[in-house]
Amino acid sequence: MVKNNTLPEINNKNNESKEDPTLEMQESFEEKESDVQVTVDTSLEKAIEVFRRIREQGDPLSDKELADLEKECDIIRNREIIITDIEHEIQELEETGKILMGPPTLTRFEKARIMGARALQLSLGAPPFIEIPESAATSLDIAMEELEQRLIPISIRRTLPNGDFQNIPLFEFTNG
């Protein structure tokens, strides 16, 4: 009696896909790319159809107007379609002594944030940067006076919607 020491073959299709995962990924990418192109083409044709209906409203168009409309539709069809945005690299805007974004004064929100943070520091035992006036009853009064004299060593970060930002030291703001 002779024993067969070979393993039975398992579904060849599964073996082929496990052998070359890059081939499978490439096919998947090509399918997605063709789906995007089909979607772009159909949405473009729908937009052109809506454009035609708007232009054809009211009185019937003359032959010259129809020819002009067809030229405009061709112009729309031939436009470059941007499918993906270019990746924006966030950067710090720098120009010494100049505020590039926002008002040249502190906004009320920036003032509130600075005074709140500084008052908390003072209430937790941080040393004040000024001589404490006799009229100061709370740490918030001391923080307001320090802010008025622009003695707090802090910078304000103003950010644009695209992520670009500028760090502005407190002493660069005008009193206002």
Image (cartoon, helix red, strand yellow):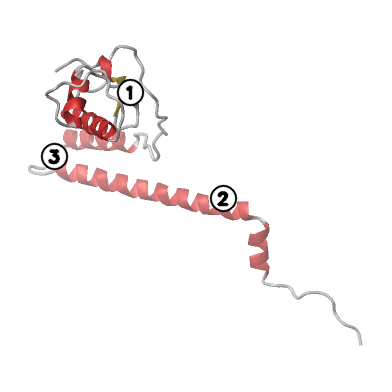
Q: Where residue 166 sits in the image (x, y, percent)? A: 33, 23
Of badges 3 and 2, the one in the foreground is: 2
What's the residue at 82%, 74% (across, down)? 6
Are dots 1 and 3 in contact, CB under 8 Å? no
Residue under pointer 3? 61
Which residue is at a point 27% across and 48% down the rendered structure image? 46
Residue 134 at what x, y percent from top left? Answer: 14, 22
Neighbour tally class for label 2: few under 14, some 14-19, many 20 plus, Cα within 10 Å: few
Question: Toward the viewer: 18 or 29?
Answer: 18
At label 2, the amino acid type is: Gln
* In the image: residue 139, left or right of residue 4: left
Answer with mark 2 or mark 1, whichever residue precedes in sequence: 2
Nearest-to-viewer mark from 1 and 3: 1
Helix, strand or loop status at disc 2: helix
Q: Which mark is residue 166?
A: 1
- In the rendered structure, which amino acid carries the disc numbered 1? Gln
- C-alpha distance separating marks 2 and 1: 42 Å
Numbered label attached to residue 26: 2
Mark 3: which secondary structure? Answer: loop
Q: How many marks?
A: 3
